[in-house]
Image (cartoon, rainbow, N blue to C red):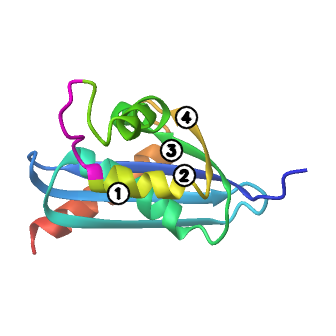
Amino acid sequence: MDERPVVDLFTDGACSGNPGPGGWAYILRDRDSGREVEASGGEARTTNNRMELMAVIRGLERLEQASVVHLHSDSQYVLGGLRDWMAGWKRRGWKTAANKPVKNQDLWMRLDELMGTHELRFVWVEGHSGHPENERCDELAVRARDEASRT
């Protein structure tokens, strides 16, 4: 029997301009205890895709032990990269099928490391559709983006 904790990780990123000030946020929920933690942060000059990736990274880094993680995201970029594209990028030395360097390679490489510890299961959430955790992550990411724009 698998003894690893099972958690839900809800994530979102926000950016004003691309590049511009950005924010990321996550909610992490333990399925057994129902305990939740949320966090957010921002950068003064970044892209939306980087913020989407940072939300996942920070959420996974928060876990204290190897876990089964149900990743809920509205980002096809994040889910497609993790589920479908990363293996090919790695085989090609972090190059795309067009033999160009993978954008945000530093973040993808960090996610690759984290996936060596955690088992990820992917759940796409339609953005801005009233999904409570996605809406909360969006609110936190926008707030973090606004704070980053003032620094």
The correct choice, above or below, for 13 with respect to 129 in the image is below
- Residue 136 in sight here: no
Measured from the top left, where is residue 36 in percent x and y?
61, 64
- How far apart marks 1 and 3 lie (CA) works out to 20 Å
Secondary structure at numbered mark 1 = helix
Q: Nearer the N terminus, badge 2 or badge 3?
A: 2
At horizontal 45% and vertical 39% (from top left) the residue drawn is 82
User: Which amino acid does the dot numbered 4 rest on?
Assistant: Val
Where's residue 138, x and y in %? 35, 49
39 left or right of 32? left
Return the mark for residue 132: 3
Residue with the mark numbered 1: 54
Figure quadrant of residue 129 = top left
Q: Mark 4 points at which residue?
A: 123
Please tell me which of labels 2 and 4 falls first in the chain. Answer: 2
Quarter in which the C terminus is drawn: bottom left
Disc 1 residue crowd, few under 14, some 14–19, many 20+, Cα 10 Å: many
Residue 124, horizontal then vertical, whole percent: 49, 31
Report the mark closest to the observer, 2 or 3. Answer: 2
Residues in magenta, as a range:
98-105
Label 2 belongs to which residue?
115
Q: Quadrant of residue 67?
A: bottom right
- Asked whether residue 106 is drawn in magenta, I would say no
**What is the C-alpha distance between the residues marked 1 and 4?**
17 Å
Looking at the image, which is closer to me, 61 or 147? 61
**Given contact means CB atoms under 8 Å apart, are the residues at marks 2 and 3 in contact?**
no
Identified by mark 2, the residue type is Met
